[in-house]
Structure formats: structure tokens, C-alpha cells
Image (cartoon, rainbow, N blue to C red):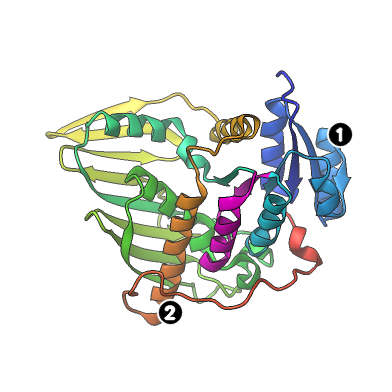
Amino acid sequence: MKPTNTTIGIIGLGNIGHLHAERFVALGADVVGIDSNDDARRRFVESFTAPVFDDHHDLFTVVDAVVIAVPNTYHERYAIAALEAGLDVFLEKPMADTWVNARRIADVAATADGVCMIGFHNRYRPVVEQFKRLQLAGRFGELTHVQANYVRQNGVPEHGGWFTRGDISGGGALIDIGVHAIDLALYLLDFPRVEEVVGTTRRGPDRSFDVEDAASAFIRCADGTTISLEVAWRTNGSDNRAFVIDGIDGSAELTPGDERLELFDGGRRTVINIDRIDPYERQARAFLDAVERDVDPKRNTVEEALAVQRVIDDIYQSSGLEHVNGPLFSTAEQGVSANPPRHELESR
């Protein structure tokens, strides 16, 4: 791959940071990294023969853009610092640990010189793009409802890690994997304005952590479309990552990761099998293109991610209050993020 003359700083060198670094290197970019974990730094150096830094301010001086892949509660700190330094930012999902902190990022991004893109890779899956092409061609007519599922039979993140610590993650299964389901459902519906959210979260009695491992919600949008959501890290049933999309003239079922699209209309069923293409690589290519052309990305925008974060906060609020929240945007958090401890750079 021809070099791009772009250097990407990877902030957080765990599994997801490593994954992003691999994609950018394959596309011809140079990478450097930062992480507080000795093993993560060592692995990064061995994999990419790339320098690592102890301080993000030093890293900022040698990069054109950054990938932020640290625990959720530290997204705000690093995203704002990078944007204020004039860098382009790729921010892993979710945008932040709360809507208020995500709003702060959005406010800075709105006036920053650099571009900002949020990491929702499912939008770059060929099966999703094929659905959008058929939608644009009118195959389904006006869409009415999406059943959005992200249910694991047994997929609780490592116990004791930050994913199951509410003070660092901002929540459990909902903000970890449910964020993907909410984002994709809203994307399939072309991001209508959300008017009402009712939801509940659950935690199994044998769980040793303080966050939810399952959530259910119903979302009503201003244009009349609706979304039903099921999310779980662990269930007594089988895995379910299917999205069922209903339209006036037809419906479809797609499963991210399984490049198979089933179409239903007039009592007929049509199956379309699509070649698998790495969505992370396509997402990285889109970000790199935005960086090098200095244009805002058309997909995975800050505004869309902020809408997703709003729904997450509203589900948590609704679960706590045990009724439909209203009005929307009523959740309020005061204060700013505390100065993070040393483990802020622990890998995702």
C-alpha cells in the first residue's frame, strides 16, 4: 500500500486500538501509540515497530490525527484535547459515558479545525449498504419499524475489567453493545427525531458487577417510526443479532457479521448473499480520506452519535424512574469529568 504521509496516534493500545492500528498501517499510514499498560505498549512496539509515548501532549506533536480507544469515561478528555490541538479525531463508540459529556465533545468539534468521526463500523458492512441501496430504490416503501437485537448467549466482558465498572464505562451491556444496535436502527431509518423512550435494564442475581447485563426498550420517533430493542451480554437463549426492518411494501432481515440479506414482500422470500468485506478497514479508509481531504465525514457523524447517546441516557433514566421519560432531553448532569487516574489509558 502506498504511504499516505499521514501519522495516526493510537490512544489506548488494547484489542480495539490494536485492530485500528492494523487497518491504518495496511492503508499506508504510520502509527504511534500511548498506553499506561506495559504489556500493551510492548505488544504495540513488537507488532508495528512504532514508537510509544508516556504523555498525550508529546504524542500530539508528531501526529496528524488520533484514534481514541480508551474507556468511555475518558473519551471526553482526550477528544476535546485533540480537537483543541487542531487534530483530526476518530472516536470509538460510544461517543462518551453520558450525553452531557458527549455534548461537550460535540460543542468543541463544531468549531474545531479537525474532523471528528465516531466508530460505528456496522454501517460499513456490505449487507447494510445493500439494504440502503434497496431502500433508496423504494423496495420497501416507507419504513415503519425496526426490531434491533444484540443478544449474546454468553458474552460478558472480563470480570473485574473496566467494561463491568459503571464508574469507568458509564453502564453495562446497553452502552457497550446496545449502542451498536441503537445506532444501526436509527441509521436504517435515516435518523428520525426521537420523541419518546421507555426502557428497563436488568442484572442477573449471580452477577458480581454493578452494571446491567441486559436491557429492553421501545423508541418512538417524530415521523411515526418505532424501534424495539433487546440487548444482553448473557442469556439462556441463543445469540441473536438480527435486525428486522418493516416497510409498507416489504420487509427485510439482516444480521451484522453474516452477509446475508433476506427480503420479504407479497408472500415471497428472496435471499441475497453478499461477499464479506472488512468493515473496519472500510471505516478506516473513510476516516483517512476525510483527514487527507480535510472534509467532514458523510457517515458516522458527531450529530448522529450524539442522538444515539441521548437514547442511551434516556433508557437509563427510564429504567430508574420506571416510566416513559418526558420530555426528552430531561436528563441533567452537573459538573465536569474528574481528573482521571493513571488507569485512564487502560486498553479497550
Residue at left offset 81%, top offset 66%? 342
Give the mark, 1 or 2, whose residue is nearer the N terminus.
Answer: 1
Q: Quadrant of residue 130?
A: top left
* Mark 1 → mark 2, Cα distance in angstroms: 48 Å
In the rendered image, the quadrant that contains the C terminus is bottom right
Which of these two is toward me, 186 or 240?
186
> Pointer 1 and pointer 2: residues touching (CB < 8 Å)?
no
Badge 2 marks a residue whose secondary structure is helix
Find out whether residue 209 is within the magenta segment: no
Residue at left offset 75%, top offset 48%? 13
Q: Using residue 226 as the reference point, say whether residue 281 is left or right of it.
A: right
Three-letter code, disc 2: Gly
Query: Is residue 145 placed above or below 265 in the rendered structure?
Result: below
Badge 1 marks a residue whose secondary structure is loop
Q: Label for residue 320?
A: 2
As drawn, the residue found furthest toward the bottom would be 321
Query: Is residue 1 placed above or below 12 in the rendered structure?
Result: above
x and y percentages locating residue 312 in the rendered image? 45, 64
Three-letter code, disc 1: Thr
Residue 188 visible somewhere in the drawing = yes
x and y percentages locating residue 143 in the rendered image? 23, 44
Q: Label for residue 49?
A: 1
In the rendered image, the quadrant that contains the N terminus is top right
